[in-house]
Image: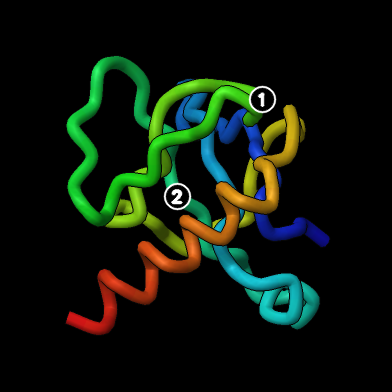
Amino acid sequence: MVNQGEIYNHLVAGARYRVVVVSSDAHNATGRPAWIAPVRHGGIDAPPYLVVLADTDPLGGAVDIDRMIRAVPAGEAIGLLTGATVERVRQAINTLFAG
C-alpha cells in the first residue's frame, strides 16, 4: 500500500517522472489505484493548482494537481512530503474541485 505524501520515481514507457501520492490513506487501503500527481521542476509562478514544495521537503519543484491521475506508482519510493505540504496539497485539491 502507498501512503499520502509519498514521493516516487514513477516509470512510464522507459521515462522517469517524480510523482506524489495525493489520495488519502483510507482510499489507498481499498486496493484501488492511488491518485498521484507529477512534480514539476524549474521556476514556477504558482497558480492554485500548483503546490510549491517547501525547503524541508525532500525535493524541489511543485505538485501539479491539475495533472493528477489514478495509477499505482511504478518505481521506488524516494521520500515523504512534510505534513504542512500535504495539507497545502489537500487545500489545492479542494480549491480545484470546488470551483
Q: CA distance from mark 1 to mark 2?
A: 16 Å
Residue 13 drawn above or below residue 51? above
What residue would you read off at disc 1? 58
Mark 1, Cα crowd under 10 Å, few <14 / some 14-19 / many 20+, is: few
Residue type, mark 1 in image: Pro
What residue would you read off at disc 2? 37
* Residue 11 place in picture, x, y as percent: 56, 31
- Residue lying at the far top of the rendered structure: 42
For numbered disc 1, what is the local secondary structure?
loop
Q: Nearer the viewer, residue 55 or 72?
A: 55
Does residue 51 appear left or right of residue 76 in this picture?
Answer: left
Residue type, mark 2 in image: Ala
What residue lies at 73% left-to-right and 39% top-to-bottom? 80
Q: How is the image coloured?
A: rainbow
What residue lies at 46% left-to-right and 30% top-to-bottom? 13
Does residue 60 appear left or right of residue 58 in this picture?
Answer: left
Q: Quadrant of the C terminus?
A: bottom left
